Every structure is written in structure tokens, then in C-alpha cells.
Amino acid sequence: MDNLQRKHVLVDLECPVCGSDMESVAHCVLFCPVAWAVWRGSPLSLRVSELPSSSFADFFDAMCTELGKAQLELLCTLSWRIWGSRNDAHWNGRRAHPQQIIEGGMNYLMDYQRAQKSMERGSRAVQMHSETKWKPPDERTVKINVDGAIAEQHRVFGVGAMARDHCGEVLATMAYQGRVVAAAKIVEAYLGNILLDCKLLMSSFLHCQVKHVRQTGNAVAHELAKRELQGEGDEFLRDEIPDYLAPFATRDKLSM
Ligand SMILES: [Zn+2]
């Protein structure tokens, strides 16, 4: 918030949760009375007001050296839930009780850990593959190629994805362009939670496998992401293929 204000973007500087103080990431996630109560009442039992950190990044750095893996997972989940409840207050006027945030976070983490265990047991592990050309999935499976690209100096990122069947027929194409708005360390902290979401969603499929492939085996998604980065592509999700991608998809089909 204070960053946006420095850039002369008009924002509401009052915290939507407690209605006082100038809102900043540190206030929202650490020092707001609701956040403070979450940290104090959670199994981490942290007294954030006694910590030397004045920014969320410093707090996160300090905790990384102090806490173990399981505690850090809880810390990331609770930070994300506190941020979510701040958004809920801002956009929907809803106020969550600290205990609700703690229980919601702990339930979410338990679901995630269960999903993680079932993935370790099953066939859903992430695999490294050296596929140098596109390979079709089997008959009952849809293959989605995904790629992302980032231009740090312009603070822009692009994401592209294409879903195809076992014949190499295109089922859907997606492209998205976004702006990097938060400090890298905070982005990293929240990326962990996006991964949690992906893993939970994956666990709802009967069979789901993630593979890393070489760029030559991922040409369509790479091209989509690159176009978004250059600002040449528009954002879309559709069941057809953009003209500029046709040669890449045809090449994949011919290599089958
Ligand atoms: Zn507040």
C-alpha cells in the first residue's frame, strides 16, 4: 500500500480490518490486532510485537533461521490466510475472527499434507524428463503444456498453456499477461501457497502427473508465454488455436 502511495496511486490507506493505522504489508500480516492475535493464538505462539522485524520480509528471513520445516509451512499458510481475510474485509466487508483464521489455516495445511502423502504413494510425483520433442498422451489422458516467462526490468510476466488429446488435436489454448507488483521475497513466500493450491487440485484427479520437459518439447506453451511478455498477445482462454501457433502445433503433430 505504501509502495502504491509513493507511486502516486490513489489507495485507501486505512486498514480495512481494524480501521486504524496506515496500511502496509507489515501492518496487515503482522501488526494489525487480528494478525497479532492469530500469531499469538496459533501453535507457533509468536509475540510479533516483541520481534525486532519491522517489515514482513525481515520477519520471514528471521523465522526461516529459527523455525523448522513444519513450522514454516504453518507460518506461510497463516500469512496467506491473514492476507486473504484482509482482502475479504476490503472487498466484501466481512470480518473473520482470529480463531477462524487459525482453524482455517490449520485445516488447509492438513489437507495439503494428506494430498502430499497420497501423491508420494501414487503416481503423481514430479518427474524430470529429457523429452526433446512433443509426445502425445495416452488415449484416456489430456496433456497440457505450460510455460511462463518473466521480463524483470519491465516487471511483466507471461503464461501460456495448451491442452491436446492423444491425436495431437488442440482442445484449448490459454494465455495470460500479468504485472509483478510485490517485492520478490514476498512473491516467493506466496508462491509456496499457489503450489499448495495446485497440489490440492491435482489430488482431486484420478491420475495426474507433472513432468518437466525440454523447451523443444514444450514449443507451443513457450511461444505463447513469450508473446504475452512482448505484449504482442492478448489474454484469452479458448477452444481453438491462434494463427501464429499453428506451425508449432503442426510440427508437434508431425513428430508424433
Ligand atoms: Zn489493521
Image (cartoon, rainbow, N blue to C red):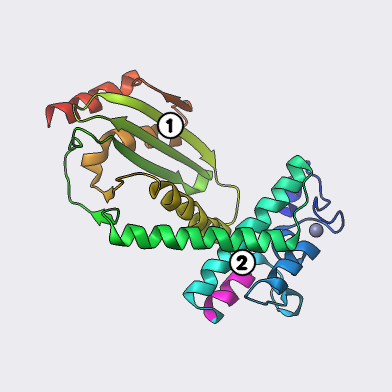
Q: Is 214 left or right of 33, judged from the image as shown?
A: left
Magenta-drawn stretch contains 226 = no
Q: Determine which residue is flagged by label 2.
A: 57
| Image coordinates for residue 239, horizontal then vertical, percent | 37, 21
Residue 46 lies in quadrant: bottom right
Q: Which of the pair 206/146 is nearer the observer?
A: 206
Circle 1 sits in a helix, a strand or a loop, which is it?
A: strand
User: Looking at the image, which residue is at 47% across and 34% down?
Assistant: 176
Q: Is 91 left or right of 77, judged from the image as shown?
A: right
| Image coordinates for residue 221, horizontal then vertical, percent | 33, 36
Q: CA distance from mark 1 to mark 2?
A: 31 Å
Kind of residue at disc 1:
Ala
Q: Characterize the local packing of mark 2: few (<14), some (14-19) or many (20 or more) Cα atoms within 10 angstroms.
A: some
Magenta-drawn stretch contains 60 = yes
Residue 91 lies in quadrant: top right
Residue 103 lies in quadrant: bottom right
Q: Quadrant of the C terminus?
A: top left
Most common secondary structure along the magenta stretch: helix
| Image coordinates for residue 102, horizontal then vertical, percent | 66, 64
Circle 2 sits in a helix, a strand or a loop, which is it?
A: helix
Kind of residue at disc 2:
Ala
Q: Determine which residue is flagged by label 1.
A: 175
Counting residues from the start of the chain, the first of labels 1 and 2 encountered is: 2
In the current view of this chain or complex, which residue is farthest to the left?
255
Above or below: residue 7 compared with residue 109: above
